[in-house]
Amino acid sequence: MITRTSALERPTTKQPRTDRGRRTRQKLIDAATAEFGEKGFHDASIIGITGRAGTALGSFYTYFDSKDEIFRSLVQELSDAVKERAALALVPNQSALDAERSALAAFLEFARDHKEIYRIIDEAEFVDPQSYREHYERTAQRIEERLAEGIKSGDLRPDIGEVEAWAIMGMNVFLGLRFSVWGADADHTEVSRAANAMLATGIASRR
């Protein structure tokens, strides 16, 4: 188990002030994604990150104080990227169930393109437990907010809420693992359709 004395410290990332600085910082984040995704937190190194990014070591310390800090920033950015991908998939006036189908399909595509997210988020449980918890709490909250809209529109039963939101999130996470990470050639449209049908009808026999 990886334990870090700085695990509960929050990011103190220095934000770049120029376009060039923003590009350099993004190169470091992209390189960190590859480094942590391939080697894991323990074996990844700042030298490895800057080597992948093609930047000087000093450039790293312009934006991040440590390996811990860039890891925390990376978890936050991956979480934000999942949020943005789901938001872009939603369209106005969708039914509540269609919204969940679209959000799942978008996540499956994202996970296929960024398989490293699973290793990075899993390691966050030990490297930075607060970021790990916040990632899932924020994701479940977004689902719960969508469900609330569905209740308001009359698409969904009025007695659903947090439990159902966490259940849907758990389903989506493991569908991504099976059909995006372990099965990258899966038909994501069909996977999201099948999952959506289960949400709509349940799995009990209609006798």
Image (cartoon, grey):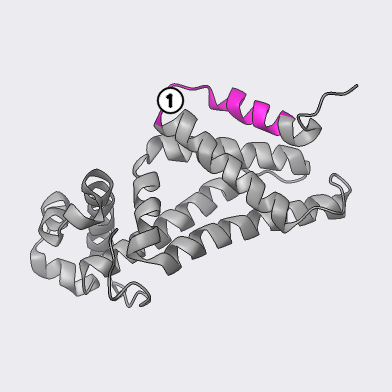
Side of 28 relative to 202 (left or right):
left
Please say whether residue 127 is one of the residues in the magenta stretch: no
Name the residue: 15% across, 61% down: 46
**Residue in front for this viewpoint, 136 or 53:** 136
Please say whether residue 192 is one of the residues in the magenta stretch: yes
The crowd level at tag 1 (other Cα within 10 Å; few <14, some 14-19, many 20+) is few
Name the residue: 49% across, 63% down: 133
Task: Read off the magenta span.
Answer: 182-197
Look at the numbered disc 1 and give the secondary structure of its residue: loop
Q: Amino acid at mark 1?
A: Gly
Tell me if residue 161 comes above or below residue 9 in the rendering.
above
**Residue in front for this viewpoint, 126 or 111:** 126
Name the residue: 21% across, 57% down: 42
* SS assignment for the magenta stretch, majority: helix
Residue matched to label 1: 183
Count of all numbered marks drawn on residues in the image: 1
Q: Position of residue 130 (x, y in %)?
A: 44, 69
Where residue 49 sits, quadrant-wise, is bottom left
Q: Is residue 43 visible?
A: yes
Q: Position of residue 9 (x, y in %)?
A: 35, 77
Tell me if residue 204 comes above or below residue 125 in the rendering.
above
- The N terminus lies in which quarter of the figure? bottom left
**Residue in front for this viewpoint, 167 or 65:** 167
- Identity of the residue furthest to the front in this view: 1
Side of 55 relative to 80 (left or right):
left
Q: Position of residue 55 (x, y in %)?
A: 12, 59
Where residue 185 sits, quadrant-wise, is top left
Q: Is residue 94 visible?
A: no
- The C terminus lies in which quarter of the figure? top right
